[in-house]
Amino acid sequence: ARPARVRLIEVGPRDGLQNEPVPIPVETKLALVERLAAAGLPVVEAGSFVSARRVPQMAGSAELYRRLKRRPGTAYPALVPNLQGLAAALDAGVTEAALFISASEGFSQRNIACSMAESLVRLAPVAGEAANHRVRLRGYVSCVLGCPYDGAVAPETVAEMAERLLDLGCDEVSLGDTIGIGTADGVRRLLEAVARRIPRERIAMHFHDTYGQGVANVLTSLDEGIAAFDCSVAGLGGCPFAAGATGNVATEDVLYLLDGLGIETGIDLRSVAETGAWISAQLGRDVASRAGRALLS
Ligand code: HMG
Ligand code: MG
């Protein structure tokens, strides 16, 4: 059955901006995060503490977290790959972190330069240290519906990796269709396999909209009882150096669906759409959200 209430996790300031080639001023990122929180997004992933050589755009994350005006009740998790990243995040005042691994070896090697097994070993002390500092942990598994390097990924592998993240102390695992290739039946099969191992309440879905399947995949997940979704304002994201890659399913599009279904979110769609138009203008991009464009036209 579909949930009556859904929690949306805004990842635009991190997943959406991390591939932007031109440096974005920290003031712009701060305004984005603060506007999204003001629109009612309960979780805004605001940055990552990764190698600046690998992801230059996220290098300002420490400054962003130091200057961020937090709203009571809003969570601002940051991506953390290792102990070095966690130390920097703690130093900047981060209180919620996201660990990330892959369900495929090819992507694991390219993204975090280690195997799937090594990634779990590497994260164990990170999770321990996070617990010592009472940092809440979220987990990501990438390539859950296919890998750009290895092709098909077995749902059982995803289930196994998701369970490992819960074992490490994550209270939610976000299943990432990193390259947006999944379609409805694959989503259903994936969720059936994962839900055999972990409770549905601990699963979030993270769809990229590369093939235009984001909203359909959200609806399919809702019907499978999932009540948490990652999304990106204005559909921000996409690597300018990888042909066809796009951002996450747009927050506005997901909100339009949820509003239409009478599912509560506590988020104001129009404010999100206005923020989406504003940030897209700042980046010199078209709004990638259909609902966002329609609402403001
Ligand atoms: P490594 O490649 O194994 O190398 O790093 P290393 O550990 O030997 O470190 C290499 C360099 O990075 C060194 O600097 C370190 O000091 C530095 P150098 O000596 O070359 O000047 N370094 C760091 N700097 C800052 N913060 C740190 C840190 N750690 C090392 N925490 C590592 C491994 C994972 C750090 C690296 O490969 C990395 O940063 N990768 C980037 C991963 C990333 O950010 N990917 C994008 C986010 S994941 C994603 O988008 C998917 C998701 O959206 C879900 C989905 O869609 O599927 C979440
Ligand atoms: Mg992603």
Image (cartoon, rainbow, N blue to C red):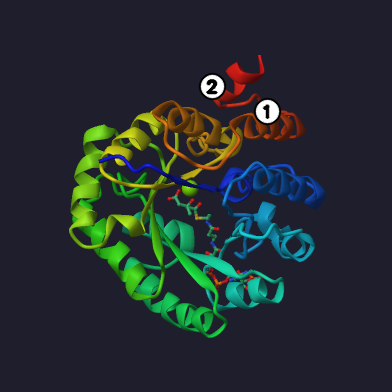
Could you tell me residue 207's position as x and y percent?
42, 41
Question: Hey, what amino acid is under mark 2?
Answer: Arg
Read off the residue under disc 1: 285
Q: Position of residue 134 (x, y in %)?
A: 54, 79
Number of other residues with Cα within 10 Å of mark 1, as a class: few under 14, some 14 to 19, many 20 or more: few
Q: Quadrant of the C terminus?
A: top right
**Quadrant of res 19:** top right
**Is 133 left or right of 189, judged from the image as shown?**
right
Q: Is residue 151 visible?
A: yes
Element marked by disc 2: helix
Separation of residues labelled 1 and 2 (CA atoms): 14 Å
Residue depicted at 47% across the width and 30% down the height: 259
Residue in the image at 21% along x and 51% along y: 154
Dot in front, 1 or 2: 2
Label 2 Cα neighbours within 10 Å, binned few <14 / some 14-19 / many ≥20:
some
* Residue 57 spot, x, y in % from top left: 68, 52
Kind of residue at badge 1 = Arg
Left or right: residue 188 versus residue 70 is left
Q: Earlier in the sequence, mark 1 or mark 2?
A: 1
